[in-house]
Structures are given as structure tokens and as C-alpha cells.
Amino acid sequence: MDAPKHSTEITKLIAKLHQAHSFQRQQIADSFQQGLILFTPQLSPRLVNAKVRYVIGETTDTDTLFSQLKLYTQKRSNTEFDLKEWLQECINSPKLKLQETMVWLKDCGEVAVHATTPIQLQAFPILNADQSLESILLHLKDLTLEIQAEAQQRLMNASYAGQFITNAQGLITQPNYAFSAYTGLKPEILETMTYVDWLKKQVTLKVPFGTVMESLLEEGSWSGEVQITASTEAQFYAVLSLSMLMDENRNIEHFIGVLQDITDIHEARSKIEQLAYFDKLTGLANRSLLQNQIEAAIEEITVSQSHAALLLIDLDGFKILNDTLGHMIGDQLLILVAQKLQAVVGSEGLVARLDGDEFAILLKELSQDHYEALQNTLALAHRIQEDLDDRYEISNRSLHCSASIGVHLFAPTLEDNQSDQLIGFANLAMHEAKNLGGNQVHLFENNLCAVAKQRLEMLQALNHSELDDEFQLYFQAQIDQNGKAVAAETLLRWFHPSLGFVPPCDFIPVAEEGRQIIKIGLWVMHKAFLQAKAWNDNQHNIRVSINISPIQFHEQSFVELVIGLVKFTQVNPSHITLELTEGVLIRNTSLALQKIQHLVSLGFHVSIDDFGTGYSSLSYLQRLPLHELKIDQSFIRHIPENPDDVAIVQSILKLAQTKNLSVVAEGVETQDQADFLREQSSELLIQGYLFSKPVPAGVFEERFIQS
């Protein structure tokens, strides 16, 4: 360490010692805070001040003084420093001048000092008028504080955290290297600034500036997250800690600042927030963020008395497309839809993706007027519906997609508004839009809650139903050109103890949604197999058709269950026709074909029900071992008056003739319909109310078999 220069204080002290008498000299020397020893040219002590006597004890003896003053060349070395020899060299120097060196003082005398104290020795020659040596003054200066300060500065500079210390006026006097690097300000620039100047220049606080100052004055410290703007290109997040140091009289001595870069932590926090609140595929808000925003919107409209709205959007036919073309194509479609929604909505609302192909839009602060808020919401909903009803180019494919949209407008006067409840209301409206055919907008109405409640009651009733007690098979005749019933379609009827008679159109969709259809469908096949065996064992030669739900058909064990039922009931599979809708071919087409081929190999006949209303491609007719087509009643209802329906029926009949397939026309209710169909083909079978409604097995047997 560089030794300090000859100080003005020592010079003044030497002048005083020259002028003073011996008694006064002692008083002057004792008042000095550092150690002083005045030697004769022969190195005998003339004067030892109180500071040195405190360390080595009372002595005027030369040898005792030098032996008691234990000085070493190094802090952790046993090599003693020969003070007497060093002083002698100073005296013998050709030119008498200030000499200085640094040594280490260890425990000595009766009073224990710091185990190793750094001491700076300065030898000042005191000359007579003739420039001869009168005395030599030895100054012993304790360097502990200076070394500690230097060590502290080195530690500060070695730290990755930016640090600074100010003086009492707040000027930044000791910035470390890291602080200069973070702020881009050189030490000489920082030393012209107070910490307040720096705060205002580069720091963006998350709390009011007055809060920081108040905390410093009242508590002596403040810490918080800030944003540092070192330049237009260099910005980062940090934790800034400020402390105020005061003396015992509460006078400010220093301010200390510590700046810890948390950019990585901030980015990690943003990443976690992204994962927690945003959809990974589309980048839109997810359900959690939507629910948070709905709760916030509820509080806001309570204050502002404005309306808010929630739109729930579900893509029509997405599941079929996703299962047919694969999830990669489906994901690309979802991304394109998300981009369209974001473009249409813009800053007007929050766009979120919930699950699968479900999206939501939250619109806040619409209007205090109910009618105006409703019109604006519906206008946006229709604009979204029109924009989504489009073709999407994905992987060299042109795919059409549309959407069903449910709208719920909620007002500040509504009670018990909760995010889950509001999403549920919009969801009910969206499902109603789907039930009405899809690709449209439907506004939530209170009666939808009653419908949903009925569906829930029905679902619970299905879960606890006793099949043998509540369900019954009905049969509807299929009549040939001779007026004879040659086949019968099996139809299911549900008579619940409390719900009463529940139509199939009501409970079948619920059973399929809740997958109770698997259990019910197995029961139907079992009973129908037994009935077919009973009729045909009596030589009645009646074919029994059974509707198979797509949910049931796609069960992995479906074929094995059918084989088991055949063995159990001993039915002849050639007396059974399994009616499948075209929809079963959409999901996992290759596996569906394998199942159908297996069933045909067992002797079952296979019919395509509701032909012409489902799968758009007829290519499957080339691959399937089919036996029969059933013309959907929607094409029968308006013949022969409607030329379009006539053309469709004629096309189906021609196709069936080409493929050598049987045809059943269902839903025939008038003689004109029957006559027209007979004119087109004498071999098709007619099914409908014209001949009979569905009836129990006993009635069917009495009416169509025994007669």
C-alpha cells in the first residue's frame, strides 16, 4: 500500500514541539491520536506519548522500549522488524529526510491490542538551526480503517451486484465497477450526481417516488423491483436496495445502494406466467386467465354500471376433421382460427382458447344501455361467424370450417355472477346454436337453463336406470312389394318411473354424450338377438335390423362382444342387419372397415342408415361389403312434389342398383309417397307410418306374422 505523504498535521506538531517546554511537549504529544516517540540522535527516548504508553506500558529505557514494541515485517510472519536498526539507517542516511515503511504490530505490553494491527512508521528528522540533527520523531499510524476501507472497496468491485456509497449530502462517492457497468456511467460522472439524480435519470419505480423517500426517512431503508434504463438499447430489471446510515445523533452520514440484476428471474417469471395463463399452441389467453378477467370485469361493471359480454365459440365438425386428417392439420387450423379471431376482435376484447376447438371472447365496458350493448355484441358475434365461415389452406388442402357461437350479455344488476356460471351460460347458448344446425349465433336465454337441468336429470336417470324394468324394444315393419313384412327395425323406448315416457330423440344424444349408450346398446342387441331367434325358429323368416351407435361401434371390444352375444343367444347372424350411420367411417376409417369386414364374415348384413346425409364421399362404397342402403326420411317427406328430393331418391336407387344393394325407404307416411317409390323400384322395402308405427314385439307378431 502506498504510504501517505508528509502531512500538514505532523509539520504543525513538530513546530509546536520546537517551541514548547518539556512539560508542554508531553501534553502536546499526548493529545495526538496516533503514536509518537521522540528520540535523541542516539535513539534514546525523550518523549513517549499516551498512545504508545497504552500499548507498551510506562518506560523511558531504550532497550525496554524496543523490546516491548513487537513489530513484524508481515501479518502472518514471525520475522521481527528491527525498529532500532531501521531508525539508525534513517539517521545515517546521507540526506536527512522523511522515511516511512509499513509493519505489523502484535500483542505486547500489559494491554492486549488487536492481534495484528497494520502500522505505518514515519521517521521525521528534527534539525537545529545549523541543520544538524537534534531529534528524530517516530510517528506510528494505525492503518486498520484505511485497509478495511480498501478491502471493502475491493469487495465491492469484485461483486456482481452494483453498489455505491454516498456522502452525507447524497453525492455518489464510491461506485463499484458493477454499478458503473450496469448504469453505463463512469465513476467521474457518478461523483457529480446524487443518488436522487440517478434515480430520476435511469430508474423506473413501481411505487411513487415519495413512498421510497418516506421509507428511507422513517425506516432507514427501502427495497423493491425497478426497471433500469441505461440507454435506449440497454434496459433491464433489477432489485434496488437503499439504506441510510446515521450517527448517534441521527445525522445522515451515508446512503448505500445495492443493485441486483434480476433480468433472468424476470424472464423466468414471464415464462411461468406464459405457461400458466396462455395457450401454448395459439398464444391466446387460456381458461385461467379468462376466468380471472371475468371476475375483474364483474367488479368493474358493478362500479361503472356498464354491461359486459362473453362469447363462446366452437368449430363445427372439427372433431371429424381432426380424427380424419390428423392432429397436425387440426392444430394448424386452430392457429389460423385464433389469428382470425384476434384480427376481428383486436383491442375490443380478450380472446382465449379454452379446450380443443373451443374459444372465448370477453368484451368489457360495452355500454350502460342494455339495448346498445346487446346490438354491439351481436354485431361483433355475427362478424366473427361470417369471417370464420371460410376455407383454410393447410398443407396443400383446402378445408372448410364454420363455427357455432353462444352469446351471454351480463349486467351489473345480475346477482351471483361468477366466472364458471357465466361461461356455463355462454356454453348453453353455443350448444343450442349447434343443435339448430351450427354456423350461427345464439343468445343465451333463461329457458336454456331449464333444458340443461332436464338433460342433467336425464343423465342421472340413465346412470341409475334398470334396463329390464324401464326399457322396451319396439319394432317397425319393412314391407315388400307384395305388402308382406319381411324385416323389422328395432327401436328403443324408455319408460322412466318419474320422468315418464322419454322420446329416443331426447335421451339417445344424452346417452351418447355420457357413454351410457354402450351399456344400453349391448342390452338392445341381446334382446333383439333373442327376438330374431324366436321368430326365425318358428319359420317366420323375419330379418331384424338393429341401430348401432358410433360410440358403441368404436369401442375396442365391440366385435368380441357381438361374437359373445351370438354364442350366448344362438342367433343366426344372417337374420340380423346392423345399421350403421355414415359417421362411423369418419373416425379411424381403416379400423372401421376391418370391423365391418369381420362382422360380414360372421354372416351379419350391414346397412348404411340415413344415407346421403353424412359422409360426403362415396368412395367407401367401393371398399365396404354392404348389403343395404336406407334412404333418409328427410328425402322422402316432400316427394313426389319436390323435384330436388325426387332427383336425390332416383340417384340413390340407381346407385344401389349398380352396386346390387337392397334399399329401404323410411318415413313413408302417404300413399302417394309409396306409389312413387314403387314406380321407381319394385324391389325396395317401405318403412313408415303408412303401414305401422313402431309396436311391441307381441303386437308386431300378431299384426304382421300370425296374420
Image (spheres, rainbow, N blue to C red):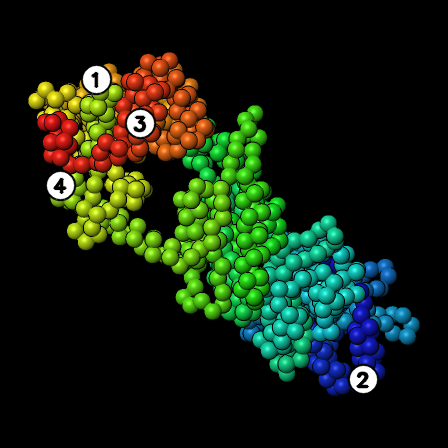
Q: State how far apart marks 2 and 3 are (Cα).
A: 145 Å
Q: State how far apart marks 1 and 2 are (Cα).
A: 136 Å
Task: Look at 58% across and 56% down and name the residue there.
Answer: 376
Rate crowding at label 3 as few (under 14), some (14 to 19) or many (20 or more) other CA atoms within 10 Å. many
Q: Amino acid at mark 4?
A: Asp
Q: Which residue is mark 3?
A: 674
Task: Look at 19% across and 23% down and name the residue there.
Answer: 484
Q: Which circle's residue, 4 or 2, is located before the other in the chain? A: 2
Q: Which residue is mark 2?
A: 20
Q: State how far apart marks 3 and 1 are (Cα).
A: 31 Å
Q: Position of residue 267 (x, y in %)?
A: 57, 49
Q: State how far apart marks 4 and 2 are (Cα).
A: 128 Å
Q: Amino acid at mark 2?
A: Ala
Q: Which circle's residue, 4 or 1, is located before the other in the chain? A: 4
Q: Secondary structure at mark 3?
A: helix
Q: Which residue is mark 1?
A: 603
Mark in front: 4 vs 2: 4
Residue 468 numbered tag: 4
Q: Amino acid at mark 3?
A: Ala
* Vertical side of 34 occupied by 666: above or below: above
